[in-house]
Image (cartoon, helix red, strand yellow):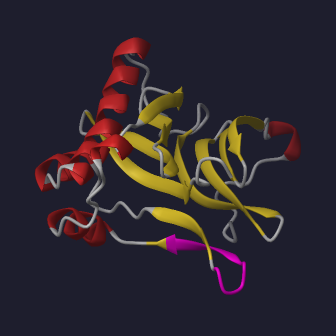
């Protein structure tokens, strides 16, 4: 930004913003411009919306814009849903191989968390090693009745996808990207769900 690498005159910016989902203090947003196409994961902390994760690709006027090609919406949607389901199944079943196949090696999931002592919200971010080691150590021993996962595609392009997954315990938003012709999870933003009846 300081080097003005993305600078464009105001009349040439043509920024389009589409809110894909707002869920209490989490939001999923799509932003298109001539130079960039972005998926934004956002949180509201201290009554201010902040961007936590961005997945982007070059826009239509960028020299690096992806070349158009075949794209089967139904096929790709089912594929990315399967990847997210494999992520959960790998965790629930302590299947490290299934988990590693679903995630990009640099995945850094984060969770919006509230400190009970202060009432303050903060972002708790962990590294990819913790995801795998927690699976290997069987830290997510979840009763069978709590393993239900509803997965929905919020938006998808040839190379990027934005999904929502809801379990009895959490709501999560996933960024996926097509890497070497395979879909991988790059970003996860989660929050705990309120106990039922509250």
Q: Does 39 appear above or below 77?
A: below
Q: Which residue sits at x=70%, y=71%? A: 2
Number of numbered labels in the structure image: 0
Q: Which residues are magenta?
A: 116-124
Taking the magenta stretch, the answer to whether it contains residue 90 is no
Which residue shows up at 28% across the image and 44% down it? 144
The furthest residue to the front: 197
Q: Is residue 22 left or right of residue 36?
A: right
Name above or below for residue 21 compared with residue 124.
Answer: above
Name the spot of residue 82 as percent of width and height, x first: 30, 31
Q: Nearer the viewer, residue 155 or 14?
A: 155
From the viewer's perspective, is residue 188 above or below residue 72? below
Seen from this angle, which residue lies furthest right?
A: 11
Percent x, y of residue 78: 35, 21
Residue 91 coordinates in the image, percent (x, y): 25, 53
* Residue 41 place in picture, x, y as percent: 60, 52
Q: Nearer the viewer, residue 28 or 195?
A: 195
Q: Residue 118 in magenta?
A: yes
- Residue at 53% x, 41% y is 58
User: Can residue 72 be seen from the camera position used here?
Assistant: no
Above or below, comparing residue 152 to residue 145 in the picture? above
Where, quadrant-wise, is the N terminus in this rendering? bottom right
Q: Is residue 13 left or right of residue 131?
A: right
Image quarter of residue 129: bottom left
Q: Is residue 43 something one can see in this rendering?
A: yes
Depth order, front residue of 173/119: 119
What residue is rendered at 25% in x and 43% in y? 89
């Amino acid at each position: 930004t300081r080097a003005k690498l993305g600078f464009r005159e105001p009349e040439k910016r043509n920024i389009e913003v589409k809110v894909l989902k707002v869920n209490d203090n989490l939001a999923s947003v799509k932003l298109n411009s001539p130079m960039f196409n972005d998926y934004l994961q956002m949180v509201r902390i201290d009554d201010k919306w902040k961007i936590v994760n961005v997945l982007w690709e070059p826009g239509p006027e960028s020299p690096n814009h992806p070349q158009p090609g075949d794209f089967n919406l139904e096929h790709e949607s089912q594929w990315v849903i399967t990847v997210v389901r494999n992520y959960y199944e790998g965790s629930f079943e302590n299947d490290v191989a299934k988990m590693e196949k679903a995630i990009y090696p640099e995945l850094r999931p984060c969770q919006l968390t509230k400190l009970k002592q202060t009432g303050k919200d903060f972002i708790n971010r962990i590294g990819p090693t913790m995801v795998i080691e927690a699976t290997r150590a069987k830290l997510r021993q979840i009763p069978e009745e709590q393993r239900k996962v509803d997965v929905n595609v919020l938006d998808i392009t040839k190379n990027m996808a934005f999904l929502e997954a809801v379990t009895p315990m959490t709501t999560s938003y996933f960024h996926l990207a097509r890497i070497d012709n395979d879909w991988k999870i790059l970003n996860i933003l989660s929050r705990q769900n309120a106990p039922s009846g509250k």
